[in-house]
Amino acid sequence: MTEQDAGQAEPAAATAGAIGPDDAIVVRDVELRYGDLLIQSKLTFTVKRGEIFVLMGGSGCGKTTVMRTLAGLKEPAQGQVFLDGTSFWEAPSDEQEQLKRKCGVVYQSGALWSSLTLAENIALPLQTYTDLDAKEILELAKLKLALVGLAGYEDFYPSEISGGMRKRAGVARGLALDPEFLMFDEPSAGLDPITSSRLDDLILDLRDSLGATMIMVTHELPSIFTVADNSVYLDNVSKTMIAAGDPKRLVTECPDPKVRAFLTRGGKEKAA
Amino acid sequence: MAVTTDQASGVGELSLSRPSPDSLLLRFSGSWTIATKPPSLDTVRAEISGGTPVKRIAFDTQDLQAWDSSLLAFVVGIDRLCEAEKIEADAAGLPDGVRSLLKLAAAVPPTDARSEKASLGFLAQAGQEAIGMVQALGELISFQGEMAVAMGQALRRKARYQGSDVLLYMQEAGAQALPIVSLISFLVGLILAFVGAQQLELFGAEIFVANLVGIGMAREMAAIMTGIIMAGRTGAAYAAQLGTMQVNEEIDALSTFGLKPMEFLVLPRYLALVAMMPLLCLYSILMGIFGGFIVAVFMLDLTSTLYFEQLVKSLTLTQIIIGVVKAAIYGAIVAEAGCMRGIQCGRSASAVGEAATSAVVLAITMIIVANGVIDVLLYAVGI
């Protein structure tokens, strides 16, 4: 996010402009609603290619809803979301489908298909969208499981593995189609600190190797400070973003006390 | 994502060369992505096994325009081949990203553990199924015991459940089931009369269609058909409801507050279904008789008075009571099968589906078995 330095978020007009080749996702003046209920408004930010971008904020502020909008799952009430330079919600449906295939989403619970083995979970999108034969697909599925440290677990069903392993298997499935944008919904939720830290390392490794752009929804401070290159803070009172920038800088430089309090657990934790 | 260079990407190509007699250079060009279906390993395998023995494999990716995990999978395959043939693989020529991903993939050794579900052979699976059936019988008996205790508590007014739940389930299992019971029962009556009429006409005994339909519906078909309908409709719903509660840990939450799932969840459903099934059965008898009436009047040219006179002569109260009591028993079977499978459900979405399927199969099987046993007993006592 080059338009905004660490500090308070700027109005939409200030950041609206031409989309550069390094801009992976551009969000312009987006407003999100469930019926009459306003979730967030005036969201304007840019995610650069190869960046790990964190959507942070308190519980119920609409982080997951924003991520769903970026993934093409929830249409905004107004505003534009550009994926790879294309305005997603204004694109024809076949182009939307093409863009969706560029997004891999790792859900909070893993959301693995319980009737399929781990290998089959990864193979399903490959069978649907590629011309690869069964042997090649199996090799790719094995490789992706190996990448997340689950080599040898191809024949296991989701119910046979632990919660942390399910999350990693969810990452492997998110990687199935080699997406350009990988989105994580609270990847560390419910994990012990060591497993959570390993998952953060995995996310960093995958970003460094594949160069994928990653969006992460989280309020886990250790994860935020470990992986985030950039972030926005969504406020659930004003229903908009009140800060944007590198969290390591926001923690000391953000003029909004609410953001500083969030990043220091109400001032009880030393800034990272 | 596909890591690309500035050049436009084409289809992935592989060329092999021998910089020295015992070394092999793999030159990658174009776009190696899952969308473009890259070359297979067979070319390399053939080169290694066919020509002069290869001691070293190197990679050249200078002309590589784009790559993703398909290149990675290919290189992993080459690595495996090299390991099997004891060939040295020099990864220096690979892109940095590929090398770091290879390192990541090899960081955790493959597990020796095997999936319990996937690793079973045919005989083991058959054996496990047999054991499962015996266990299911045991569980059914155990559930019956728990149910009896819960009923005892209910009779002593000590069971803890919400009375409003019973009314809600009575509405679901009663009034809301009327349309499907009407349709099926009417058609069963119609079919019984139709099939019977064809045979009875041969003897000029068409009038006995009324006996066939009346006794058939009252004694057997109404109760069985209502039982089967409710097994598919309500039994499956009970299994799915309780199964989903099991997945969401709602049943555990009840237990931690000292509320017994058997009383709070199962008992209201059981009471509602046992209360509603006899009424549904009576309604089903009427609908079946109406179906028979249509055939008798419009196909066999009997008058409606004749049909109903013959029906009243042949149909006794005992036969109706037998049907109604059977229906109450089938209601208990359906409620128990649905609730038992729901309570026993695993903690996944597929487990809920399996619980619902299993509840329906168990209920229908038990209904047919129970019907056979009851009929034999009635025959033995001469009713």
Image (cartoon, coloured by chain):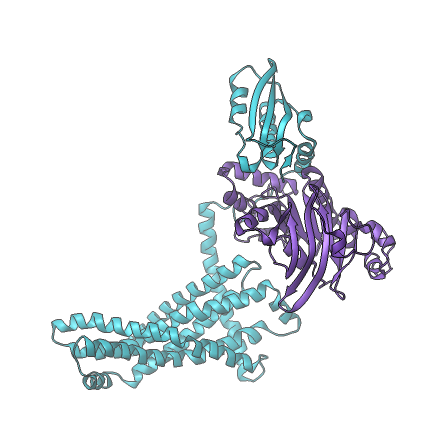
Q: In this view, does A29 lie above or below A165?
A: below
Residue at 43%, 65% (x, y): give it.
B360
Q: Could you say which quadrant of the image residue B243 lies in? A: bottom right
Q: In this view, does B198 lie to the left or right of B319?
A: left
Q: Is residue A96 left or right of residue B92?
A: left
Q: Depth check: B255 or A79 in front?
A: A79
Q: Is residue B56 above or below residue B184?
A: above
Q: Which chain is cyan?
A: B
Give coordinates of residue B183: x percent, y percent. Answer: 34, 73
Give coordinates of residue A193: x percent, y percent. Answer: 76, 52
Q: In this view, does A260 lie to the left or right of A22?
A: right
Give coordinates of residue B328: x percent, y percent. Answer: 41, 78
Residue at 54%, 46% (x, y): give it.
A125
Q: Is residue B383 above or below residue B132?
A: below
Disc tally is 0
Q: Depth check: B30 or A264 in front?
A: B30
Q: Is residue B111 visible?
A: no
Q: Depth check: A75 or A186 in front?
A: A75
Q: Can residue B135 be seen in this view?
A: yes
Residue at 58%, 65% (x, y): give it.
B246
Give coordinates of residue B145: x percent, y percent. Answer: 51, 72
Q: Which chain is purple?
A: A
